[in-house]
Amino acid sequence: MDRLIFTAAQAMSEYRLDRHNMTHELANISTPGFKKAYEVANKPVRTEGEGFDTRFLPRAFTSPLVDLESGPRMVTGQPMDIAMDANTVMPVRAENGDIGWTRRGDLRLDPEGFLITGEGHRVLDETLVAIQLPQGSYGYEISREGSIFVRDEQNPEQGSVLVANLGIKDATGVDLLRRPDGLFQPLNPADEGLDFVAGPGVASVSSGILEGSTVNAVETLVKFIDHMRSFEMQTKIVTEMKENDSSGAAMMRAS
């Protein structure tokens, strides 16, 4: 009985990683370009110790690999909003100075004219240098290839001028991990700067569109309900085993 109680208690404890993951997903259900990661799977693990190694206990294992599946698209009509096509990712400068990769495309300019994401990370060009754009009476356009054009609204006859290129890359076949700050980094970087060799696909973006989160609220809530029922079942097992143990002890005293 003690073994069964310990197994049930261990299962209840291992569910915590999955609950944390689902809570994280629900918190980012409205975050543009959010990708699911940290998929949790319970696996039986043989326990080691004195006696026969015949007991298996459930252990939760997580995978930090990012799923780049495209999310729903929302047309905004804003020239600084972009959605990355296929497996395209964009480099940004993380707070600690590293190169991070993201799918978040709600871009804007900070007071110094640097192009930043909605989280405040500076966007990098193809040479991994922060992009700084002129401010004032200018209009901006971003092409499918990631080229940024600027036009002077007061002198429209001058046309649009190419000023920078987004450092977008195709991540097809590249294993990306989620960092603690929410950005991505390659599992096997090409150098210490956390850059990687581009995949065989063509990197491109769609302007005037934002990619939504890939989290399905209904699916995640159903998983929460399933976990609640599993937790209740494990609790019931522990309670019943305790009652059986008490009944057995009472019978021994009566004899």
Image (cartoon, rainbow, N blue to C red):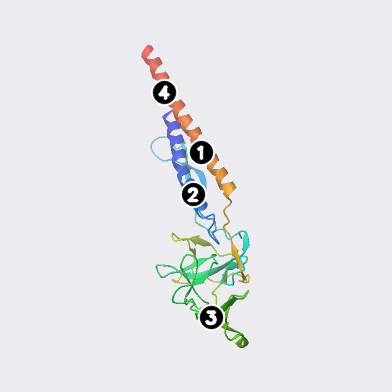
* Label pair 4/1, CB-CB below 8 angstroms: no
Q: Which residue is mark 3?
A: 137
The amino acid pointed to by label 2 is Thr
Measure how far apart labels 1 and 3 are at the Cα level: 56 Å
* Residue 23 disc label: 2
Measure how far apart labels 3 and 2 are at the Cα level: 43 Å
| Crowd band around label 4 with a 10 angstrom C-alpha radius: few (<14), some (14–19), many (20+) | some
Kindly state the secondary structure of the residue where label 4 is placed: helix
Measure how far apart labels 4 and 2 are at the Cα level: 37 Å
Q: Residue 48: image x %, image y %?
A: 41, 41
Q: Is residue 216 above or below residue 160?
A: above
Q: Is residue 146 above or below residue 223?
A: below
Comes first in the chain, label 4 or label 3: 3
Measure how far apart labels 4 and 3 are at the Cα level: 80 Å
What is the residue that sits farthest to the front in this orientation? Answer: 154
142 left or right of 246 in image:
right
* Label pair 1/2, CB-CB below 8 angstroms: no
* Residue 58 disc label: none
Q: Which residue is mark 1?
A: 228
What is the residue that sits farthest to the left in this orientation? Answer: 253
- Comparing marks 4 and 3, which lies closer to the viewer? 3
Q: Is residue 12 above or below residue 124?
A: above
Q: Which residue is mark 4?
A: 245
Q: Residue 80: image x %, image y %?
A: 56, 71
Observer-nearest residue: 255 or 227?
227
Measure how far apart labels 1 and 2 are at the Cα level: 14 Å
